[in-house]
Amino acid sequence: MNSQPNYMANYLPILIQLGLALGLSGGILALSWLLGLHRRTRRKLAAYECGVEPVGDAQNRFAVRFYLVAIIFILFDIETVFLIPWAVVFRSLKLFGFFEMLVYMAIVLAGFFYIWRKGVLDWNTPERAE
Amino acid sequence: MPITVFLLFALVKSLIAIGILLSLVAYIQLAERKIVARIQNRLGPNRVGPFGLLQPLADTVKLLTKEDIMPSTAHKLLYLIAPAIAVTMALLPISIIPVGRDIHVLGYTTPLQITNINIGILFILAVTSLGVYGIVLAGWSSNSKYSFLGSLRGGSQMISYELALGLALVGPIMLAGTLDLRGIVEAQSHIWYVIPQIVAFFIYLTAAFAETNRSPFDLPEAEGELGAGYHTEYSSMKFAMFFLAEYINMITVSCIATLVFLGGWHGWVFGPGWLQAILPVFWFCLKAAFFLFLFIWVRGTLPRFRYDQLMGFGWKFLVPLALANVLVTSLVISLR
Amino acid sequence: MYPVLFFIFAGLAVAGAISLLVQRQPIYSALSLVAVMGALAALYLLLGAEFVAAIQIIVYAGAIMVLFVFVIMLLNAQPAEAPGRSRVARALGYPLLGILIAELGGMVAAHFQNVKLTSGEYVVHVAQIGDALFRSYLLPFEATSILFLAGILGAVLLAAHTEDEAPGKLYIGEAPPEPNLIPYDSTEGSTTYNGAGQPVRTDLPAHPSSEEVRS
């Protein structure tokens, strides 16, 4: 544990930036609403569908692949998160660090090639997975 | 430096940075139209003002006075906050990007950076990961089929390439041993990381193009098949906000590429004192401008990917390559 | 200054959590949870745990909640209907909630003088986390890779389905559609012809009149 007096102070400007960014986006939205025209017609407010009347609801169910990609992304994102502190201290771990990550990655990559073989990463046709 | 002065400096720097960004976006967009026009053997905008230089102003006025449409079937609240999320998440990373060394103003020494935090790169990754919400919510809340498909594609594409983006940065972090952006730049005083990390550099660039939804990865707004993609239902300045967010994100990833791979503000410094003070900032801007030009050049040159190619390329090529790069880099460092 | 920030972000976290519970629209509940994650990240920052704060955003807000939002979109989740109010729940729930709040309030009041809100007096650097993770706690770290593998297998098993003719084989996504053998201009079904002999589909609603209704 280290003492670092400027630690919190360094994060306050981010809060300022956040406030300015929110203010700017709110300001643009308000300005656009104030300056823009408001001639609403039912046709104009309908969802765009190449000029025809919208058919059905847009929020349909969609392919399970999108959902799978999101799950697999979580897993690999966590792996990336583990890699970052490892990369920071790598110079002191040396060859030991390489081998511990090699073991870790070997197990993770086994999972990666499993999903590859199962066709989770294939998007071209609804192919049959082996 | 007392905390009040520090915060005042930060506020002023934030305002300057946002001002510069907004005008930069306007002129990058003009430059893009001009350059793409030349690539396609056209002239581009040249009527408003000399050489079309007032075109961005005319566009802004036009967008401001356009009708502000809210589709009757939209989820009103989400429809309004989606562009705000996009712009906010685009503006946040700028607060930690250093553009040069310290400067002396009014008797105080302050870095040419809004603020410096220990976990710079992680902060960038965190904010990038929140950028997905702008696109996903925009498409979902519009309740239009084109928007919905665009946002689905955009969401999946962004999370897939975010992975490659994060993994590409692990190599340079290993070489520098820090997450602090200034520290990474200072660690490159002898050799720019683009040389030992050439593979990571290309992975980063490719992933950056996909993260910002730029050509050849602009599938979320593929106009040939999806109308305007996730912002089909957005008009006037609400549309412009997505546009703004995209261009600010382009600037951010260009700056990060400059800092992490091209040695930031390192470069040839010569001449009298005032020139020595300005040159680092000049080199930084020149390198970032190179990446911005690359974005435009690629857009004018490469055709768009197909969706299955895009996902396959990200998952089956970039991610394994990035992992291999991490392992090879670590082996080389540990054997040296 | 920093205690004020603590109360702001703690308040945001609690408000987000309450909003998560009372929202009818699933998507607003999910977004409330994102706000809770963001507020928690800010609280971690105040405690000097910058790495944990960043991970809180990257993993929880940026990955897990994206999955939640995708699932809500995937299932086209509709606003929840209010469940029938149970009399027992009301009779027991509100008094118990009151007791809980009173107890928490009592605890806070009793210890309020002793509590010191730190503000970055102790900062944990990423290098320290790396040292702990890759030296002291190496075995738990390597064990997470097994957890990781189990997660991958679970995800594939959840999303894949088997088909009757080939039990034991997994299929991702939908099976290829059967080729449609019925010719388009078949007179069967709902196809009718207009005066010019063109087929007219009757399963679509008739085109509404072209008058524009001003709202």
Image: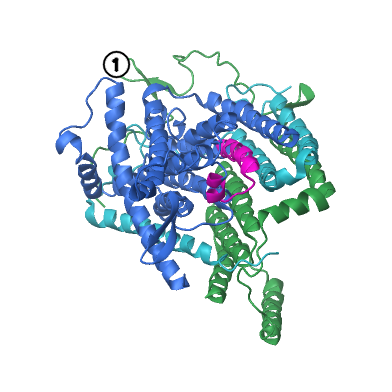
Q: Which chain is cyan?
A: A
Vertical position of residue C109 compared to residue A2: above or below: below
Secondary structure beneath label 1: loop
Q: Is residue B116 visible?
A: yes
Magenta-colored span: B161-186
Considering depth in this image, is B277 or B47 the residue closer to the camera? B277
Q: Is residue B185 magenta?
A: yes
Colour chosen for chain C: green
Kind of residue at disc 1: Ala
Toward the front, the furthest residue is B272
The residue positioned 70% from the left and 36% from the top of the image is B333
What residue is disc 1 on? C196
User: Could you tell me residue C54's position as x and y percent?
Assistant: 60, 54
User: Could you tell me residue C157's position as x and y percent?
Assistant: 74, 35
Considering depth in this image, is B318 or B187 the residue closer to the camera? B187
Quadrant where the C terminus of chain A sits is: top right
Q: Is residue A89 magenta?
A: no
User: Could you tell me residue B313's position as x and y percent?
Assistant: 57, 26
Considering depth in this image, is C124 or B249 the residue closer to the camera? C124
Q: Crowding at label 1, few (<14), some or many (≥20) Cα neighbours within 10 Å?
A: few
User: Could you tell me residue C142's position as x and y percent?
Assistant: 81, 44
Colour chosen for chain B: blue
Vertical position of residue C69 compared to residue C29: above or below: above
Q: Is residue A35 left or right of residue C208?
A: left
Q: Quadrant of residue C168?
A: top right
